[in-house]
Image: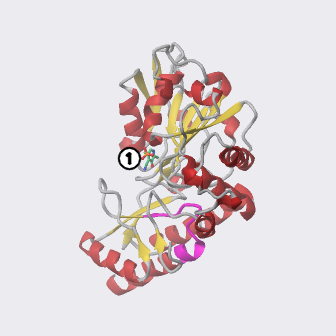
Amino acid sequence: MNQTIFNFSAGPAVLPHVVLEQVQAELLDWHGSGMSVMEMSHRGPEFMKIAAEAEQDLRDLLDIPANYKILFLQGGATLQFAMVPLNLMRGHGKASYVQTGIWSKKAIAEARRFTAVEIAASNEDRHASYVPMQADWQVSPDTAYVHITGNETIGGVEFDFIPDLGDIPLVSDASSHILSKPTDVSRFGLIYAGAQKNIGPAGLTLVIVRDDLLGHAPANTATMLDYAVYAKEESMHNTPPTFAIYVAGLVFKWLKQLGGLERMAEINARKARLLYDAIDESRGFYANPVETRNRSRMNVPFTLADAAMDEAFLKGARSHGLIQLKGHRSVGGMRASIYNAMPEAGVQILADYLRDFARQHG
Ligand code: PMP
């Protein structure tokens, strides 16, 4: 990362500059061990310490209760689309999903390979622009769990509440907003997240799961698809993604030093406001279709009223050091991802650029 370049990629995404500097400083010789973290045995004392600290720091940051396990997996959030139904059916005949956009649809399609799926609620009636209120959900009492996508990375739709489902476990795909604010983990049965947005490098997937939900996978489940194996063997049944865990651990320490998730949440709220204000003040030059209460604080998608200007917009942005602003290939337009590691200064420059471009071309 270059300090004059601001990278708005949706993931893999920007990492804290100071973390990258530390990685660079330690790359050849970690703490006098004579080894790079990449070269260490995952069962050696050095790496065991790195992994244990990463886990503890994450537990501290999210205040994760003792009856929740933290698992370090691979396979991305996409593998969790399968592992969740493989592990959590517990003899139930169906699972429930709240459909809020492209990522929840993918989770639903994968779950259907393993179980009947009940769509508890959907936002398709209004172009996937909001999160249906829980009062409007239909959840069968005998469902195995309810799955939500806490933040839709492409649509920019974020939950503004934690559903209350009584004894039915709540499962959340938190890939693109984990660690962006304090979260009451005890309200969830399971939370999962690919690392490459708000945690660290790609290749690591995080699962936080309540321990009573472990050990229910059918007997013929592949070993590597059974959460209980990771829980029992401290995520070291086989070789874990060691380097990614190390970098994630440094990101956790960075967050702690910064003041934790309350502080991060304040900064993130300010950053998001800068962009949404610039969009809303443009009187239609830019548009974001998401209902205000569900506007994502992490991914800000927007369109230009005249799509013929998209290329000029992106070219101008690049000349200001603002990169990776092109929207997801499935929806077009623009998207600014402003994860924890995106400095406020970068968002301010983008907000200023939005105003300047609109003035020049409006
Ligand atoms: N869920 C969400 C909300 C995502 O944003 C993504 C990736 N963009 C995924 C799942 C898929 O993640 P992965 O590429 O790690 O499988």
Residue 292 within the segment the image draws in magenta: no
Q: Residue at x 60, y 27 (%)?
A: 169
Q: Residue at x 61, y 23 (%)?
A: 214
Q: Which quadrant: the C terminus?
A: bottom left
Q: x%, y% of residue 164?
A: 63, 33
Q: Residue at x 52, y 23 (%)?
A: 87
Range covered by the magenta-colored residues: 336-348
Q: How many marks?
A: 1
* Three-letter code for the amino acid on which mark 1 is drawn: Arg
The residue beneath circle 1 is: 126
Residue 343 within the segment the image draws in magenta: yes
Q: On screen, 280 above or below 151?
A: below
Residue 313, located in which quarter of the rendered image? bottom left
- Residue 122 in view (yes/no): no
Colour pattern of the rendering:
secondary structure
Residue 237, located in which quarter of the rendered image? top right
Q: Residue furthest bottom?
A: 360
Helix, strand or loop under label 1: helix
Viewer-nearest residue: 55 or 154: 55
Q: Is residue 11 left or right of residue 184?
A: left
Q: x%, y% of residue 355?
A: 44, 80
Viewer-nearest residue: 76 or 143: 76
